[in-house]
Image: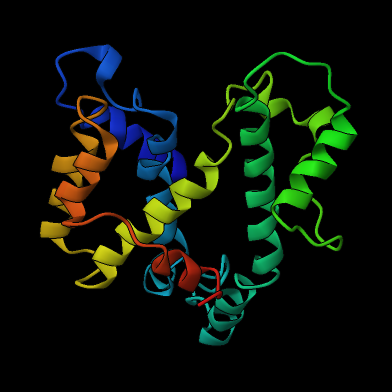
Amino acid sequence: FHEFGHALHGILTRCAYESLSGTNVPRDFVELGSQIMENWAADPEVLRMYARHYKTGEPIPDALLEKMQRSKFFNQGFETVEYLAASFLDMDWHTLTEAREADAVAFDAAAMARIGLIPEIVSRYLSPYFTHIFSGGYSAGYYSYIWAEVLDADAFQAFKETSLFDRATAESFRRNILERGGTEEPMVLYKRFRGREPKIEPLLKKRGLD
């Protein structure tokens, strides 16, 4: 479902230039088309259509569906703070205004103290092995992982408000997001689809933090 979303972003493009088409968008917008598709994969309504016993063909039991839904909320508070701590650490490195030698361990400790991270939660990554932000293409962009979740949760809510298979909503997403690629600012495109800026509440609900 995830990679199919990326494929749709490329297949449905209506951009004149390849460099602005499909997934050639700002990094903090590139995962919207893919991550929103994951919501269908795990939704009970959709699971009942394809999740069947390999021998009997019986659909997945409601009791198991309920357990799967509850399991999504496990430890989400820890995971959310863990991601955010790593995002703040990334920004601390990439907002330094002058070159300097730094003790990475001490730098990490100071960064975590600034955001009030409690000792029981450790940042997902610490500087000595945080390759994403030094050689992995996510310099000053690690936040895009969780920002993409904000976008996809809010965008999927548009379908929940109508129907998971609502044609008008799907065509609006196609026309305003997938077809446009990187030809306009991401927030302009998103507001055109959703009618407003994204809200945090759908993600909090999805993670069981509401």
Q: Could you tell me residue 83's position as x and y percent?
A: 65, 50
Q: Could you tell me residue 7's position as x and y percent?
A: 35, 33
Question: In the visual, does 28 lie left or right of 112?
Answer: left
Residue 205 higher or lower than 99, as above or below: below
Q: Which of 82 and 65 is in front in this view?
A: 82
Q: Quadrant of residue 74?
A: bottom right
Q: Which of 179 and 190 is in front in this view?
A: 190
Question: In the visual, does 124 lie left or right of 30?
Answer: right
Q: Could you tell me residue 166's position as x and y percent?
A: 17, 64
Q: Which residue is drawn at 54% across and 78% down?
A: 65
Instruction: Give the residue furthest to the left.
Output: 168
Say how many tags the image has: 0
Q: Could you tell me residue 46's position as x and y percent?
A: 38, 67
Question: In the visual, does 96 lie left or right of 159?
Answer: right
Q: Quadrant of residue 2?
A: top left
| Colour logic | rainbow
Question: In the visual, does 141 lie left or right of 178?
Answer: right
Residue 20 higher or lower than 33, as above or below: above
Q: Nearer the viewer, residue 111 or 10?
A: 111
